[in-house]
Image (cartoon, rainbow, N blue to C red):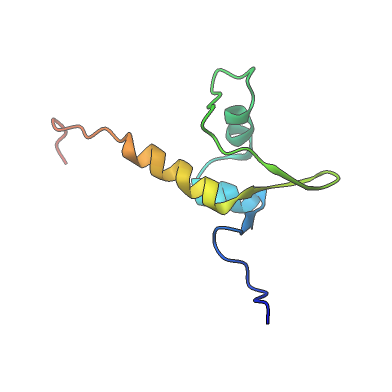
């Protein structure tokens, strides 16, 4: 019997879901993907084509990107809260 529920590693995020997960706007997402943009990020997850005019992002790649960003965090030791 096959399981119809996709695992998190096979889950596809649509653009709105990607915006919510990353906390980024649509324009920021596309700026990070465009090599012509000053905000281009070569590590940003690439979309996968789902059909004509339809794309999505692999959840596992988005999570890996977030972990990579988290590993590069800078803590300001001089800040006062």
Q: Residue furthest bottom?
A: 1
Tell whether 15 sits left or right of 74.
Answer: right
Q: Residue at x 61, y 28 (%)?
A: 31
Tell whether 70 sits left or right of 17.
Answer: left
Q: Residue furthest right?
A: 52
Q: Quadrant of the C terminus?
A: top left
Q: Residue furthest front?
A: 1
Q: Is residue 5 above or below residue 68?
A: below
Q: Quadrant of residue 78?
A: top left
Q: Nearer the viewer, residue 1 or 27?
A: 1
Q: Quadrant of the N terminus?
A: bottom right
Q: Position of residue 70 (x, y in %)?
A: 35, 41
Q: Residue at x 64, y 25 (%)?
A: 34
Tell whether 55 sits left or right of 10.
Answer: right
Q: Is residue 79 above or below residue 54?
A: above
Q: Nearer the viewer, residue 78 or 43?
A: 43
């Amino acid at each position: 019997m096959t399981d119809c529920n996709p695992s998190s590693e096979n889950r596809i995020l649509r653009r709105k879901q990607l915006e919510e997960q990353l906390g980024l706007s649509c324009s920021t997402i596309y700026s990070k993907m465009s090599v012509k943009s000053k905000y281009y990020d070569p590590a940003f997850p690439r979309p996968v084509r789902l059909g004509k005019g339809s794309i999505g992002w692999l959840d596992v790649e988005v999570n890996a990107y977030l972990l990579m960003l988290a590993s590069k965090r800078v803590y300001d030791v001089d800040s006062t809260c």
